Amino acid sequence: MHLDEERRSAQDNLDRLTENIPSRLSEREDRFADKIEQSKTNPSKKLESLYLFMNELYGYASKYTPCKKGCSDCCHYSVTVSEVEIAHIEKYAKKKRRKEFLPKEDFHGSPCPFLKEGNCSIYEARPFVCRRHVVFTKTNTWCNPKISKDETFPLLRFSSINEAFDHIRQVSESFELYDIRQVFSRDNQR
């Protein structure tokens, strides 16, 4: 598909999603950051609540995107994780972090350590950036890591979701961001 057609398709799909999102979801998203901030639970539980709501919200968006199980191009992008997310992955996916993290570098083009046979092996515990990354082009052509930085397309951003995540990082003192490849090894060696 031609670049201009992909851009138009992405904007059209995003517009359709925005117009058709159920009001109950839209209203919940509008209030979600406040709900998380007022919650008396610990940061780990807040993160779980955020992830559950994101599953519902982004599940609705799935009909407007070429993103499907088995397409793993975005699993070769930088995948940032904070301390609260690292702990979540360790707890729910039963994966251990490296004893010493690798130095920072540009990991774009390298597979995520949890990518197994084209699928995410920690899907239920996947990080925030993975949950929120959704494209609206007609095809996934521009998701290929070799060309993904060449063009930009409209992406879905829910401000209250982002605010809730920022709050969770703040209260958990998860200020530092790492690439998932710095933290976890492909074979889970420590």
Image: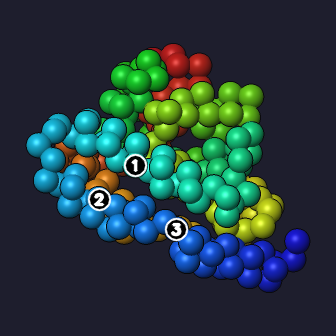
Q: Measured from the top left, where is residue 46 in percent x and y? A: 25, 42
Of the image marks 1 and 3, the number of the one nearer the N terminus: 3
Task: Identify the disc placed on residue 32.
Answer: 2
Q: CA distance from mark 2 to mark 1?
A: 9 Å
Residue drawn where x is 80% and y is 83% of the image: 4
Residue drawn where x is 17% and y is 55% of the image: 37
Q: CA distance from mark 2 to mark 3?
A: 16 Å
Q: On the image, which quarter does residue 49 sit in?
A: top left
Q: Are marks 2 and 1 in contact (CB under 8 Å)?
A: yes
Residue identifier under label 1: 53
Residue drawn where x is 67% and y is 73% of the image: 13
Q: Is residue 101 left or right of residue 151?
A: left
Task: Identify the disc placed on residue 21.
Answer: 3
Of the image marks 2 and 1, the number of the one nearer the N terminus: 2
Q: Which amino acid is tagged 3? A: Ile
Of the image marks 2 and 3, the number of the one nearer the N terminus: 3
In the displayed structure, 90 sits above or below 119; it is above
Q: On the image, which quarter does residue 25 sit in?
A: bottom left
The local crowd at label 1, few if under 14, some if 14 to 19, many if 20 or more residues have their Cα within 10 Å, is some
Considering depth in this image, is 134 or 53 the residue closer to the camera?
A: 53
Where does the C terminus fall, quadrant-wise?
top left
